[in-house]
Image (cartoon, helix red, strand yellow):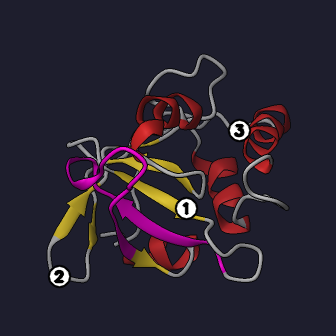
Amino acid sequence: MPLQFQADDPQPVTDAELSRLSRLLSADIPGFRLDAAYEEFLSRHHKQELVECTVPLSDDSTMPIDLFLTFDRADGVDSVVGFWNAIEDRINEFLVPFAITPGNDAFCFDYEGFPDESIRVVLWLHEKSEEDAPFTVPVAESFSEFLQLVK
């Protein structure tokens, strides 16, 4: 079953919000760009509340998604920048969170190897991560593949 959202109106992410994130991340990730499928997703579902959903993992377990992070300028912990700032000591410059779980783990884009390699999706586990040593589990080879996995 594809992702389902509450009936509230989406608030499409603005070009200014996308540019702000790009400026922040391009210092660490040369040639930074968002996954095109993720940009399309943001144009349709930014700030919409999810109906319960899970992502299957390679060990046959599942992980629920609590919410997709926003691009708000306020930088609260429900925004991409705010959440990254809250965990920056346990994450590296190649991981960009986009959704969080009820336990405050995060689904992230993994830019390590970019632009020669695709932008993969991983699950960052906060309890197994240490300062400057993020612990991640591979989830999907792309955001499009990630969306196909969600149930």
Amino acid on which disc 3 is placed: Val
Q: Position of residue 26 (x, y in %)?
A: 80, 49
Q: Residues within 10 Å of mark 3 (few under 14, many from 20)?
A: many
In magenta, the rendered stretch is 118-138
The vertical placement of 150 against 41, above or below, is: below
Q: Which residue is mark 2?
A: 59
Give the left or right position of residue 115, taking residue 136 as reference.
right
Q: Residue at x 57, y 22 (%)?
A: 75
Verify CB contact (< 8 Å) between mark 1 and mark 3: no
Task: Label 3, secondary structure: give it.
Answer: loop
Q: Residue at x 25, y 51 (%)?
A: 52
Q: Residues within 10 Å of mark 1 (few under 14, many from 20)?
A: many
Comparing marks 1 and 3, which lies closer to the viewer? 1
Task: Label 1, secondary structure: give it.
Answer: strand
Q: Earlier in the sequence, mark 2 or mark 3?
A: 3
Q: CA distance from mark 2 to mark 1?
A: 20 Å
Amino acid on which disc 2 is placed: Asp
Count numbered badges in the picture: 3
Disc marking residue 1: none
Q: Position of residue 132 (x, y in %)?
A: 43, 49
Q: Which residue is mark 1?
A: 109
144 vs 44, nearest the viewer = 144
Q: Residue furthest top?
A: 74
Disc marking residue 13: 3
